[in-house]
Image (cartoon, rainbow, N blue to C red):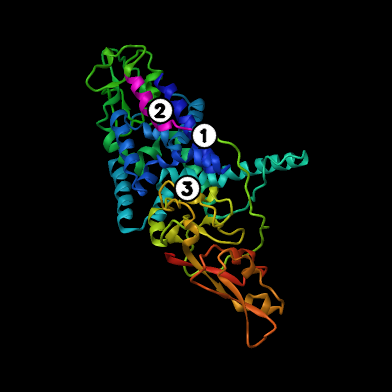
């Protein structure tokens, strides 16, 4: 029963987080946003004390069920492990804890947090971020293709229930890293079960410090044990030593596989004060406690309806090239480039949720795969606040009311040599006409009184990128947005 409950809750969490990371529609993102916010590292970066205490309490009560129920990367490894079990049964064996490696990685991870060199480390080691990259790079494009096929079919029948979305490569780095991550995790899980979780993952190691002394544990009933070793051979965490009748609770993820395969009822999930043999067969009180604890983590899902993408009536201009910005652009709500860099875990959730194709992963080593803004395929509309609403780490804080139009994330810069007015002697006021803040005006020059060129009022410009996106100049816009290190509020 323990194993069935765990599998049911884990499957539900995996589906919810996968749908969330695919960015299918806004209502689903809002309904499922809680699933990202209860992930340990994003909660830690957001300083969400309630979530952190809840996860620590859950671990103190029931052990590392976070790793087998809530963490999507852990659940994904279980899927690979299940496939490996079909090929070769009873393939695991006990191995001692590699403390030097586990705590060495954790120490290095914490050190990077302290000194601020966080982005490259978290993007490679953080479990939720790794799963986010995999889904965003490999699964979301498939979902978008299905969506566009449905939209085309529905349009031919006079229905507009679905709307087409752009499918394009936001980064080459992220798919490459995602494929490598997926292959490594799949090979490790197929061959050795939870090697990543119990050797490399800093979150698993941190929770193991609490799980060692959990109240409810899987325990041996030694009088019933026949030393058949079947439990050890099915422990994906390599945490059971049947010879000594001990379990390494710092690595046990409470999956219940050992209980399932034991033919002598020699393993039970029970509290430390009672003997395993004293626990009633059915119904088991400790199992009910497990259900209550895990259900809190997986509950609260609301029904959602499909929301079509609205483009505001402006056609997207394509085939532009990004300018070289001296300062990167980060979304309103990030407060500053430095704060964003320190808090963002690069899970790609904001990238998949952005309806305007503004966010894409950075290739900068300093901000490795963290999102940044660019306006080749869209611009940041003042009414859109999705990235802040879904960000679990609060690297992008939610924006309430109409405050976004008062946040200046950058300012527009005019490049005379690219402008059609000066380079092609064509009258154009596209940037001024489409500026939602009225920050651009056309002024006549002394050199050519018949032509007017744009002039930017930096005090009004919010850096939304409408001018850059809608500028007809190719391949580089005649006007682009330069980011602000510290966002300015008016």
215 is within the stretch colored magenta: no
The furthest residue to the left: 273
Q: Which element is circle 1 on?
A: helix
User: What's drawn in magenta, residue-wise?
Assistant: 286-303
The secondary structure that dominates the magenta segment is helix
The residue depicted at 51 percent of the width and 25 percent of the height is 86
Q: Is residue 307 above or below residue 429?
A: above
| Residue hosting label 1 | 15
- Real-space Cα distance between discs 1 and 3? 20 Å
Mark 1 or 3: in front is 3
The residue depicted at 38 percent of the width and 38 percent of the height is 197
Q: Position of residue 289 (x, y in %)?
A: 33, 22
Q: Position of residue 213 (x, y in %)?
A: 24, 31
293 is within the stretch colored magenta: yes
Q: Position of residue 393 (x, y in %)?
A: 40, 48
Q: Is residue 210 above or below residue 403?
A: above
Give the mark nearer the N terminus: 3 vs 2: 2
| Residue hosting label 3 | 389
- Real-space Cα distance between discs 3 and 2? 24 Å
The furthest residue to the bottom: 447
Look at the image and tell me in which quarter the C terminus lies: bottom left
| Residue hosting label 2 | 295
Mark 3 or 2: in front is 3
Q: Which element is circle 3 on?
A: helix
- Within-10-Å neighbours for mark 3: few <14, some 14–19, many 20+: many
- Real-space Cα distance between discs 1 and 2? 15 Å
């Amino acid at each position: 029963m323990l194993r069935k409950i765990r599998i049911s809750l884990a499957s539900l969490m995996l589906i919810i987080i996968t749908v969330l990371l695919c960015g299918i529609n806004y209502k689903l993102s809002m309904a499922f946003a809680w699933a990202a916010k209860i992930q340990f590292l994003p909660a830690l970066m957001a300083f969400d004390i309630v979530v952190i205490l809840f996860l620590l309490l859950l671990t103190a009560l029931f052990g590392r069920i976070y790793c087998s129920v809530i963490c999507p990367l852990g659940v994904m490894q279980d899927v690979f492990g299940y496939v490996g079990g079909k090929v070769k049964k009873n393939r695991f064996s006990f191995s001692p804890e590699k403390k030097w490696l586990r705590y060495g990685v954790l120490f290095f991870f914490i050190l990077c947090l302290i000194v601020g060199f966080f982005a490259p480390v978290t993007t490679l080691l953080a479990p939720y971020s790794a799963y986010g990259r995999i889904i965003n790079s490999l699964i979301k494009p498939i979902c978008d293709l299905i969506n566009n096929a449905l939209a085309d079919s529905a349009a031919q029948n006079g229905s507009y229930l679905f709307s087409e979305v752009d499918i394009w490569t936001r980064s080459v780095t992220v798919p490459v890293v995602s494929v490598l991550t997926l292959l490594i995790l799949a090979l490790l899980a197929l061959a050795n079960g939870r090697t990543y979780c119990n050797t490399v993952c800093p979150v698993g190691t941190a929770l193991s410090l609490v799980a060692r002394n959990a109240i409810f544990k899987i325990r041996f009933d030694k009088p019933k044990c026949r030393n058949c070793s079947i439990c050890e051979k099915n422990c994906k965490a390599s945490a059971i030593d049947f010879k000594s009748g001990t379990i390494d609770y710092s690595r046990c993820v409470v999956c219940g596989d050992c209980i399932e395969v034991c033919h002598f009822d020699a393993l039970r999930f029970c509290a430390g004060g009672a003997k395993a043999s004293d626990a009633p067969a059915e119904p088991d009180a400790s199992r009910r406690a497990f259900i209550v604890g895990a259900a809190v983590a997986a509950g609260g899902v609301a029904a959602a309806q499909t929301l079509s993408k609205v483009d505001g009536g402006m056609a997207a201009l394509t085939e532009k090239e990004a300018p070289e910005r001296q300062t990167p652009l980060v979304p309103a709500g990030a407060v500053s480039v430095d704060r964003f860099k320190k808090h963002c875990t690069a899970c790609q959730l904001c990238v998949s949720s952005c309806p305007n194709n503004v966010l894409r992963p950075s290739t900068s080593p300093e901000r490795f795969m963290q999102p940044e803004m660019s306006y080749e395929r869209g611009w940041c509309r003042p009414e859109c606040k999705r990235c802040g609403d879904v960000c679990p780490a609060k690297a992008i804080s939610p924006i309430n009311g109409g405050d976004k139009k008062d946040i200046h994330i950058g300012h527009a810069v005019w490049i005379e040599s690219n402008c059609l007015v000066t380079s092609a002697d064509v009258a154009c006021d596209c940037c001024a006409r489409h500026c939602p803040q009225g920050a651009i005006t056309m002024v006549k020059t002394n050199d050519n009184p018949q032509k007017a060129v744009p002039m930017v009022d930096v005090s009004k410009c919010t850096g939304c990128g409408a001018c850059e996106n809608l500028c007809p100049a190719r391949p580089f816009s005649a006007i682009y947005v330069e980011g602000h290190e510290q966002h300015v509020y008016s």
